[in-house]
Image: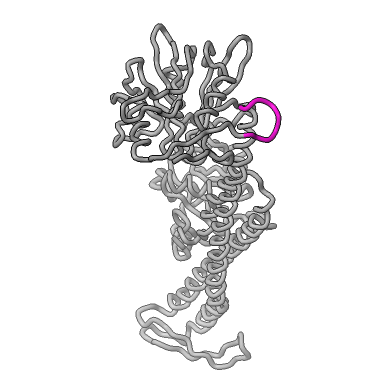
Amino acid sequence: MTAVSTPSSSSLNWKEIDLILEELRLEGSLIQEIHQPRFDRIVLHLFREGTAFMILLSLSARFPRLHLLTVKMANPEKPLRFASFLRAHIRGGRIESSEQVRAPATDTDPDPVPGERIVRIIIQRGGGRMILWLRLWGAAANAILTDQNGTILDAFYRRPKKEEMAGKLFDPLTAAASARAGSGVKRVFTIRELPGSGSFNEKLEALFEELETKGDVAKAAAEADAELAMSENKVLANLEKLAARLAEYATVERLREMGDLLTSNLHLMARGERWIDMEDYFHENATVRVELKPELSPAQNAERYYDKHRKARLGKSKVQEEIEHLEATLKRVQVQRASIAENPDPDALGRLAKSAARARKPLTSEGTPGLVFASPPFRIMVGRTAAENDTLLRTRVRGNDWWFHARDYPGAYVFVKAPAGKSLPLETMLDAATLAVHFSKGKTSGQGDVYYTRVKYLRRAKGARRGTVLPTQEKNIHVKIDPERIERLKAGVGA
């Protein structure tokens, strides 16, 4: 039975590999550099007879291949494992020979295929020899470096079951014979006719660039759209929940009114009462019944409603901030979905798919790190540890927000969220500075100097512990810890 290889096949056949090696003429080439632009690709930078050139070794399951590379590929920020290994072992070496492995005739296979699609590249370096084996077999593709005796130094894909790992002997023909056994098919191979101009190497580069780009873009676009669709639905669901929570705060000002009514009628109240009927001057003096706590004094009952009002206002502020954040996220996600069809870069689409997942979590899902205090209409956030300080600085504040820190003492970072168009009043400044001293090692002295500045004037300190910053344009304020101020702030805490 005979089969003919089709020109559209994505794998190289043995005749094509021979032609590629014949055109490349790798013998005598100096290996100047090695890099690994993607997990499944190795690029060798070579120099021969006054000419520098590159060759690509692709070990992908879809398109395993070897050919000339004319377009430089981006280098990753950190060297990948196998590229680092090859640099240590063969960079600076010279290619002595390159050829395709041939299987000898045997009794069981008197007419073997003339080429096994396994390339043997012998490299001379420092008086010794090493062999780089390239097996271009689709899902079984691999690159293996051995010493001249065949002992494996390392493999691109480490496969213990096939004994393709350091310390084992590599026999290229054993695997080839096993792959042919029982197939019963003799194939007739031809060199495919490829479009374009130039050498066979150059035509191959153009062909696979088109095949990979189309496939990668389609796959990345589908994944990015699916992730963005999930994010959009999640954001919409969270917005619906937050709208319902916001509606619950519609009566927040009524709590303050209750506190005012009780304060105006303290002379009518006594400890131990559960209810009081009063004229409601906020609503045309209609009679209103207000619930009391019997164990509290009249003044404490009034303060209880003020406390509830402060906490409700804080909760409402946080929900409103979260809604604004999610609305901005929703707009961004929708714009990104609309732009997918126009984006031809698979790497950019891949990054977009990864970032889309982060959009599915609202700010309140994780909670604000540290403690949150109310200094209406401002919010004050306090980071009690280096981790909380760093998280607040990276994710919860913006350039125009304010930063406070006790001078000369280790302690908390205190941030004041700055509402648009509002300057920082003295009372809020004193609240923040008092908290900075209270949550510092200088607390026991009862007073201290605090420096403060805008967040945009903070600079991260290189090489220092996480969260460490260097302030600029800072100013100083001296405060004494006021117990009543601390108690008021703690009453409105929203940790």
Looking at the picture, tell me which residue is in the foreground, 80 or 418: 80
Q: Can residue 317 be seen in this view?
A: no
Q: Is the magenta stretch mostly helix, strand or loop?
A: loop
> Looking at the image, is 450 positioned above or below residue 277?
above
Q: Can residue 60 be seen in this view?
A: yes
- Quarter in which the N terminus is drawn: top left
> Looking at the image, is 447 positioned above or below residue 68?
below
Residue at image position (45%, 26%) is: 114
Give the percent coordinates (x, y) of residue 23: 59, 20
Give the percent coordinates (x, y) of residue 192: 60, 34
Magenta range: 193-201
Residue at image position (62%, 55%) is: 418
Residue 197 covered by magenta stretch: yes
As drawn, the residue found furthest toward the bottom would be 287
- Quarter in which the C terminus is drawn: bottom left
Its colouring scheme is one colour
Q: Say how many tags the image has.
A: 0
As drawn, the residue found furthest toward the front would be 1
Residue at image position (53%, 56%) is: 380
Residue 133 covered by magenta stretch: no
Looking at the picture, tell me which residue is in the foreground, 201 or 372: 201
Residue at image position (39%, 23%) is: 145
Give the percent coordinates (x, y) of residue 198: 69, 26
As drawn, the residue found furthest toward the top would be 127
Give the percent coordinates (x, y) of residue 249: 54, 75
> Can you tell which quarter of the image residue 152 is in?
top left
